[in-house]
Amino acid sequence: MDSEVARVQIEDIARLKERKKLTYLLDGLYGSLAAEVNQPPIVLNLEDMTGHRGSADKLLEVSMNALERMEIGDGRNIIAATTDNPTVMKAFRRKFQEKFYWVLTFPCFLHGLNTIIGEICAHLFMKRHVTKATRVVTFFNGSHYWGGQLKEQAKKDGINRGLKKNCESRWYALVLQSMSVHDHRQSLSHLCLREDAQKKIGGLSPVAPDVVTIVLRDAEFWPAIEQGIKVMKPIVDLIGDEESRDSPLASCMLGLIRLAKTISQLPIEDGDNVDFWQHTKAVFNRPVNGRSFKFMVEVALDIAKQWRWSEQLAKMLVADLKDYHKSSGVFSGGQADALDWWETLPISAERCPLKAFTVIIHSIVPHAADVEHYFSGLGGVQSMKRCNLSVQTFESLSKLRASYANFLHKVDHEAGKPTRRKHAHMHTRPEHGLDTALAVELQRSFAWVPPLAGASCNSDDEFLAGPESITDEELLEEFDRFENEMLESRGLQEGTGEVPDIFKGDIIDWNELEKVDKGITPTGFVEEIDVVARGSQGMEPGWNINALLTSEGVAQ
């Protein structure tokens, strides 16, 4: 095995040195990867962090060691770092950027979508009913007899999947749980109507009275579950569609816009809670707030200053942004694949700094899905029955596994087979875009085995329904913790003025979105772009953003 590990290590180092637009992905418990749009990720290291304090300094130390081992310790090939977004990761991203001034840092886009689901569910009406759904699931999955009875009844009713538990902090699992409970509505009703379910017979315990009440007598419960699924399932679809390595920043943003369009077109039906719908709109309008052209230029100049571009390059960048804003000259036209459009733009990056700027931006991997896939996929390498591997051996096996998986991915791609990931807990499609229909394939793929049945040791659902599966009481505690975090975060982000409504078209013109999806690729050429090489040889630029905005006519 040592010779094979050495071969993979040499190949990985060579691949890393060739790439100039890597995104550093870090998992705070285990290790890190180097990812790139449309390229397989490369494992940098596997680190046992359980015996250390999860501090930003320790994470930085582990990261630097990983980069040094893979011979990219100068960081020149890295353009961005993406992690999930707890406080320690925010501090790590800040320290990592201090180490490599040109690196842009981002919280994971998919974790952000998960947080949106959490905020939507935090509405008092929906929180009350998803907690009831968790109570139903907890009871039947915790009762050998009644869980088995429900399984048998579900088979008679043609239901081939079991009740899915929710998991702490994975808010998208609330949608999956709601869908599984909704699918079992008929079976649950038949079961709870039985005499032995409503009262003790022969000394055997009936179904818990509060569960019977929820299933049979709560007039709000089932309409609330249906409304929650209708509103939140498109967000889960987007998470599944955008978690592949061919989803750059633009794809994620377009997916978010399409999601807003989908939700804006959802009808309010009889029995829907209007206040919950208004809450959903308010939550969704926060992350998609519109911004002025001046704001966009300020952000671009702030990045250019971070990259230590000269004042002359900054002025050229502003001029390009003006032309791009008017869709004039070389910037006319467009298509959904932003990275391809900019790379093939028929003008050199020397003459058009905006091309160099946007190629880098659109090369960023905006989510940490690759690192999540990598570590959850190692469940077959080390398990409860095989847990004595040393960290070094485990890392070697994991690198071999990643190398073989990348090889098979390449073979499938060359053979024209779909290579986008498909999960038991996510819906994905071979083509880009958002699935707005409630696909039958999604329903079939949500398979959770009740307690009395044997479960596959490699099931994706072990990632969902493992030690983190929680009860209704624990869910309420998690809601309280989450709401406190949101209040603190919102207090730092509150702005002034009226918030534009994306659902009314105040921010996005839906007709323009269709034009983007049908854009035509211009003929051009692809050139190598190095973000560090364009800077002022590491010197701090002397120009001022506000002064430049005024001189270029963007601000008064």
Image: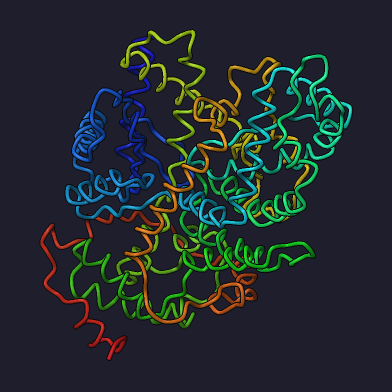
| Figure label count | 0
Tell me: 285 left or right of 29: right
- Residue at x 66%, y 45% (from the top left corner): 429
Would residue 283 be seen by someone viewing this image from the given angle?
Answer: yes
Q: Position of residue 4 (x, y in %)?
A: 39, 14
**Residue 413 placement (x, y as % from top left):** 59, 36
Taking the view exactly as shown, the residue that stands out farthest to the right is 156
- Residue at 18% over, 38% down: 57
Q: Is residue 300 left or right of residue 404?
A: left
Quarter of the image that includes the C terminus = bottom left
Residue 410 in sight in this render: no
Residue at 35% in and 48% down: 21
Q: State the image quarter where residue 465 is shown.
A: top right
Q: Quadrant of the N terminus?
A: top left
Asked whether 285 or 13 is in front, the reply is 285
**Quick one: 278 or 324, which is closer to the camera?**
278
Task: Determine whether, in the image, residue 291 is placed left or right of residue 546.
Answer: right
Closer-to-camera residue (547/287): 287
Work out whether 286 lies above or below 189: below
Above or below, 488 against 304 in this view is: above
Question: What sort of colour scheme is used for the picture?
Answer: rainbow
Write the residue at 66% across / 57% down: 231
Residue 242 image position (x, y, % from top left): 55, 49
Q: Residue 252: x and y, percent? A: 51, 56
Q: Is residue 245 above or below residue 105?
A: above
Q: Quadrant of residue 525?
A: bottom left
